[in-house]
Image: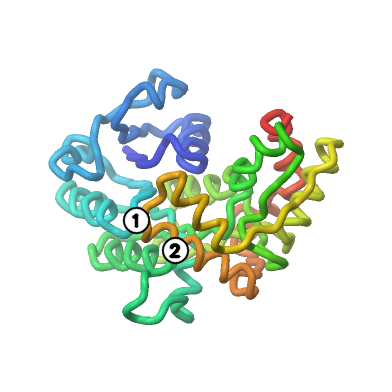
Amino acid sequence: MILLTGATGNVGREVARQLSALGPPFRVLVRDENKVAHLNARVERARGDLNAPDTLAAAMAGVDQLFLLTVDSGSTHTAHAIEAAKRASVRNVVLLSSMGAAAERAAPAAPAGQAPSLGRWYVEREEIVIASGIPWTFVRPGMFMANALRWANTVRTAGVVYDGASGDGKTAPIDEQDIAAVAVRALTESGHAGKSYLLTGTELLTAREQVDILSDVLQKPIRCVAQTPAEVAESLRKAGAPAALVEGLLQLRASVRVGRVARVSSDFEEVMGRKPRTFRAWCQAHASEFA
């Protein structure tokens, strides 16, 4: 039995879809079953909350494989899930980590005593999994292509994208379907224990270059408007983002600007035997969401 956490997000939803197509039994951990109403009725639902450790034992019962995706600031949810997994004798954990973890291990983005970077949070999560003694696989994607969906409203209403203070920094965004495909391989095949997969697309692109591709696919002019870090911070605060998350996201944008994440990895092709989807193909698949 496989247990999925985070099954309602971009990657988790895709992991669930691909597992449904393959056929192995799995269940999803949910706080609100209405949010997984799209799943096949044969998929088990387990009510639980990573904020409430006492709700996790039933969800872990009989579980062999755990796909762990957490969205909290820090590592509390990971600690709760891994403790429950140990008690349930789970045999394998596939953790959705981040390229930021690899970068943070190589060179910390924030000096000791300053607010932690997002990469440091992912390192903390990985360390909790390693310390558990449960065999693990770390899936470390770079920028998600799905991040471009943040632009959809302003593209529809004003033909404009605000670039989020990334400047001329480049990333190699990866499709959420491709991230999920590697996670599913690690959940359903042997030979992945103890491995960390750095997942990127094949193209290094600035935000403006991504906007140009989207504009060409939509056959619609789109302006790309640069933002300052202060403008980004103010927008995030207005949206209700916690201070630690605001600081972490600003550090991430700074890392993009200085080229710290301008990296292309071959790990996806080595695992899957094919190249990842291009940003143009992703835009074509999601064009209706911008129209």
Name the residue at 44% across, 78% down: 108
Query: Within the image, what quadrant is residue 159 found in?
Result: top right
Q: Quadrant of residue 133?
A: bottom left
Q: Earlier in the sequence, mark 1 or mark 2?
A: 1
Left or right relative to 86: residue 107: right
Q: Position of residue 182 (x, y in %)?
A: 53, 51
Q: Quadrant of residue 261?
A: bottom right
Most foreground residue, 248 or 191:
248
Tell me: 29 left or right of 261: left
Q: Nearer the viewer, residue 127 or 3?
A: 127
Q: Secondary structure at mark 2?
A: helix
Q: Are marks 1 and 2 in contact (CB under 8 Å)?
A: yes
Quarter of the picture containing the N terminus is: top left
Give the residue pinned by disc 2.
248
Cα–Cα span, label 1 and label 2? 9 Å
- Disc 2 packing (10 Å; few <14; some 14–19; many ≥20): many
Name the residue type under label 2: Gly
114 horizontally vs 182: left or right: left
Query: Circle 1 is placed at which residue position?
Result: 73
- Residue 263 point in image, percent of width and height: 64, 69
Q: Residue at x 58, y 57 (%)?
A: 143
